[in-house]
Amino acid sequence: MHPSPEPPSGIHPLLAGRFSPDRFDPSAAVDDGALGLLLEAARWAPSAGNSQPWGFFTGRPGEPEHDRLLPHLAPSSARWATDAGLLVVALTRRHVGDTSLLYSEFADYDLGQAVAHMTVQAQAMGLAAHQFRAFDLEGLTKELDPAPGWAIVSMVAVGTAAGGPPKGRDRHSVAHLRAGPWSPAE
């Protein structure tokens, strides 16, 4: 990867300023209005055939839902995610009920777009979001018991970042992105 400390001009400030914090301010809450806007942003994400194959389980500190999530965090994510004002479990609907019939072959991709919309909305609201997969998937699935056809994919911690973005964030070059997997790596 090549260091690119400053994003090129023309990139929207919400995208250029986005980062995944490794510390959250534990005193900063995500209120009902903010939670509603985050979910609304996800709701407006595009999806194949307008299938909208996503769902979210949310928990904020002090809520029983939050307490259900904490024991399933891996130690690496528990260090910072516990202090976030909101934890979001992202689920996707892959199958129709308990059959092997696909609900949407693009379900995971579409869920990713919904979460991306959520993270940009968080940024617009002065919040930060950190997507992660460092949790006990089997244990969390048993805990939440999603409906047949649904699967937990990832989690997102949302809140007020404690500290700024890391210095010298590395990003692949545009040439590397255009080269793709069909060309030798840089």
Image (cartoon, rainbow, N blue to C red):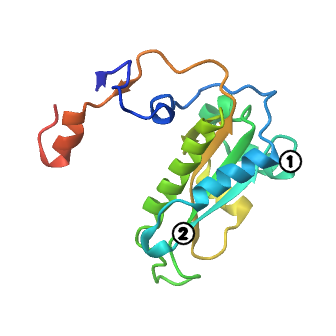
> Which type of secondary structure does the marked residue at label 2 adopt?
loop
Residue 178 visible, this angle: yes
The answer to whether residue 65 is above or below residue 86 is: below
Tell me: 156 left or right of 99.
right
CA neighbours of label 1 inside 10 A, class few (<14), some (14 to 19), many (20+): few
Q: Which residue is mark 2?
A: 52
Amino acid identity at mark 2: Gln
**Residue displayed at 66% across by 37% down:** 125
Q: Quadrant of the N terminus?
A: top left
Q: Position of residue 27 (x, y in %)?
A: 82, 27
Residue 139 visible, this angle: no
Q: Position of residue 124 (x, y in %)?
A: 60, 38
**Residue displayed at 86% across by 47% down:** 63
Tag 1 or tag 2, which sits nearer the N-term?
2
CA neighbours of label 2 inside 10 A, class few (<14), some (14 to 19), many (20+): many
Taking depth in this image into account, of 13 and 73 the one nearest to the observer is 13
Please identify the quarter of the rendering in which residue 97 is found.
Answer: bottom right
Q: CA distance from mark 2 to mark 1?
A: 27 Å
Q: Position of residue 51 (x, y in %)?
A: 51, 74
Q: Which residue is mark 1?
A: 63
Mark 2 vs mark 1: in front? 2
Amino acid identity at mark 1: Glu
The answer to whether residue 144 is above or below residue 186 is: below
> Which type of secondary structure does the marked residue at label 1 adopt?
loop
